[in-house]
Structure formats: C-alpha cells, structure tokens
Image (spheres, rainbow, N blue to C red):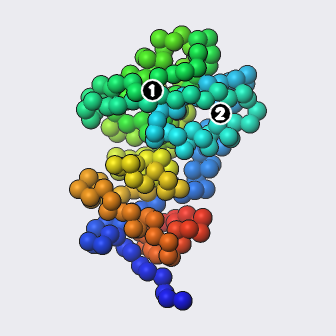
C-alpha cells in the first residue's frame, strides 16, 4: 500500500483548511439545542429552516427533538446585494403558523440584516412566539442587533465551509466545519475540493485522517 498523501494546502501551495468544529462537537451542539427547544416548547414547535444552508443542521435538530411534536417548513431567499439586508422571498411558508411557537433555524447569523427581515416576515403571520436558532453566530460582523435564543457556537470573523455552509454551492456535504482562506475561495471556489473530498488518507492542517473513515480531523 502506498503511503498516505500529504496535502498541507492546495495544489498551488495555498493555506490548508483547518477543522473548526468536528463531528462530535456538532453532535453535542445539536443535542444541547434540541434539549433547550424541548424545554421551552414542551407541547409542539414549528422549525422553519432557511434554505439551503440550514438544511443539514435542521434535519439533525428535528431528529434530536424526540419528546415534542415537530412541524418543519422552509423559507428560501435570494439576496439582492451582500450586507444590504434586501432579500426576495423565493419560497414562502406553507404551514399556517398563526398562534403557534415558531423557531427560525439558520446555519449562520452574521450581520443580522437577513434574519431581521425574516423575523419581520414571519411575525406578520401572527405566531404565538418567534425565536431564532443558529448553528453559528458571528457577532463581530453584526450591523443590526439581534437576539439569538439558541446558538450552537460563536465564531470569530473567519470564512467557514461544511455542514451546509458553502461557497458557489460547493462543500455543503463536508460533515464538519472547516475554516479556510477567504481570499483563496473567492478567487478559486473549487480550491479545497481535493483536500476535503479525496478518498485517500491525507493531512489537513497538520492532522492526518482518512476522509472516508467517518472520523473527524481535530487540530
């Protein structure tokens, strides 16, 4: 058997991806948040996922809430301009949420502009309660102050991919969250495909693993 390949970065020698949140940590965040939602809404709850980024997180979260009836619906939006907060609704709610407890589920709350718009949009449907849940919170970039009731983990102002998070629709199905070089991804969206999807054992950010072994890299 040939020795494992070592990829410290991309083929062009760019900085390697670094695992920011591994699988076990993600699972702990999901279980904790599921418990918090169950405690706050012991009868039933409507989880509204924001497509596409929140899909994987929402799926795991809904399955982790085992003692409460969960209704799932989705919103899909198109952003007109980065950091503008102006959005267009591509898919609206199908479930009647009037008089019900609703939690909007996001992958990442950043500037707060988009979630502020979505809160206002859903509030027009007269839910009994309305809260926000996010896997990741990046408060350093906040423009509009927002209360996020359920938070998986706060992160610094870093560029992250995986577990639903993407760039140019790549990397969504990486089963953990990696921090990558923003400049590299913006210039070449596919730059980290080989490093994150190769089938052979290799090194990412100084830690060796087989990407198909099911075991996360931990720095």
Which quadrant is the N terminus positioned in?
bottom right
- Secondary structure category for the residue under label 2: helix
Along the line of sight, the residue nearer the viewer: 26 or 198: 198
Q: Position of residue 11 (x, y in %)?
A: 30, 72
Q: Is residue 9 above or below residue 157?
A: below
Residue 207 showing in the rendered view: no
In the rendered image, the vertical position of residue 52 relative to residue 185, given as above or below: above
Q: Residue 162 in the image: x percent, y percent?
A: 46, 52
Q: CA distance from mark 1 to mark 2?
A: 28 Å
The reply to whether discs 1 and 2 touch (Cβ–Cβ < 8 Å) is no
Q: Earlier in the sequence, mark 1 or mark 2?
A: 2
Residue that appears at 66% across and 43% down: 31
Residue ID for mark 1: 91
Callout 1 secondary element: strand
Q: Residue at x 28, y 68 (%)?
A: 14
Residue drawn 62% across and 11% down? 99
In the picture of the structure, the residue carrying the numbered disc 2 is 36
């Amino acid at each position: 058997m040939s020795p494992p390949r070592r990829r410290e970065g991309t083929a062009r020698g760019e900085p390697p991806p670094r695992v920011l949140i591994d699988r076990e940590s993600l699972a702990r965040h999901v279980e904790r948040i599921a418990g918090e939602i169950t405690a706050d809404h012991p009868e039933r709850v409507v989880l509204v996922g924001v497509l596409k980024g929140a899909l994987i997180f929402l799926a795991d979260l809904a399955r982790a809430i085992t003692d409460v009836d969960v209704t799932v619906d989705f919103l899909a939006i198109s952003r007109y301009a980065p950091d503008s907060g102006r959005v267009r609704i591509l898919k609206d709610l199908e479930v009647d949420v009037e008089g019900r407890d609703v939690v909007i589920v996001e992958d990442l709350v950043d500037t707060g502009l988009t979630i502020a718009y979505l809160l206002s949009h859903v509030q027009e449907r007269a839910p009994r309660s309305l809260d926000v849940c996010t896997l990741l919170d990046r408060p350093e970039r906040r423009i509009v102050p927002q209360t996020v009731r359920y938070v998986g983990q706060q992160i610094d102002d870093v560029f992250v991919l995986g577990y639903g998070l993407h760039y140019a629709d790549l990397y969504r199905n990486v089963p953990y969250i990696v921090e990558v070089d923003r400049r590299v991804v913006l210039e070449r969206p596919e730059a980290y495909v080989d490093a994150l999807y190769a089938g052979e054992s290799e090194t990412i950010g100084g830690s060796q693993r087989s990407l198909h072994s099911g075991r996360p890299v931990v720095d």
